[in-house]
Amino acid sequence: MRRYGARRGWRRDTSESGRTPPNLRQLFLRRTDGHGVIRAEASTTLRQAVGKDSMELFPYLRKLFTYDTWANREVVRALADAGKAPQRSVKLMGHVVSAEWLWLFRIIHEPQKYGVWEDMTLEDLKNSTDELAQVWVNFFEELKADSLNKNVSYKNSKGEQWSNNLQDILMHVVMHSAYHRGQVAADMRAHGLTPVYTDFIHGVRQNLV
């Protein structure tokens, strides 16, 4: 933990040896602006960590989408095995799947085939999730790493015109789906059901992603 003192600047908790771990020393530089105010500046190490180039980010994004596919399939399977799946859970997963299709169509500039909150049955979810899984595989096989830095122009569900970096859009897709899968898990618990375990680190530990 770091504490801030008006005159003494940054004070860092140290390791057992009494010394600040080297990686923390590298991450922050101390500088006084002449008025006794200490400001932290990102060091070269931090800038490199945040500003990884597209070649490094590309394989990790592919890994995240492998995780996303596995997690979506696990949740759909759990809903199917529940017998009578909670209606809200099915609706939320319909939104997860339809939103992923929606963003894909925006990226490739194709007409959207699904609404933001598409009503789907469990059978629809299974079929659409399987199809989407292969589409994302094909997408990354054809995508060039340097394309991640390009902007994608699109209209959102309100008809507003926007333009965002492709890598930001892809990260949003993964995070958006994870967020709503969490809602599905909470809804299943509320109905006395046991949700499936889809934590990212679990998938990594089990070599599922």
Image: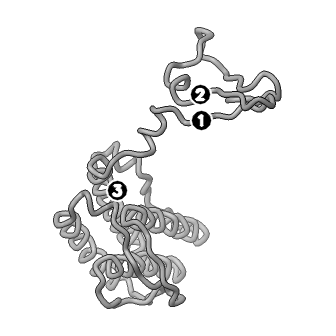
Q: Which quadrant of the figure has residue 189?
A: bottom right
- For the image, the number of numbered tags is 3
Say whether disc 3 or disc 2 marks the residue closer to the N-terminus. Answer: 2
Q: Which residue is mark 2?
A: 29
Callout 1–callout 3 Cβ contact below 8 Å:
no
Does residue 104 appear left or right of residue 140 in this picture? right
Q: Nearer the viewer, mark 3 or mark 2?
A: 2
Q: Locate residue 19, reporting x and y percent.
A: 59, 12
* Label placed on residue 64: 3
What residue type is disc 1 on?
Answer: Glu
- In-image side of 98 versus 2 (left or right): left
In terms of depth relative to the viewer, which is nearer, 58 or 96? 58
Disc on the earlier residue, 1 or 2: 2
User: Marks 3/2: CA distance?
Assistant: 33 Å
- Does the residue at mark 1 contact the one at mark 2 (Cβ under 8 Å)? yes
In the displayed structure, 110 sits above or below 205; it is: below
Residue topped by disc 1: 41
Residue at point 37%, 67% (across, down): 72
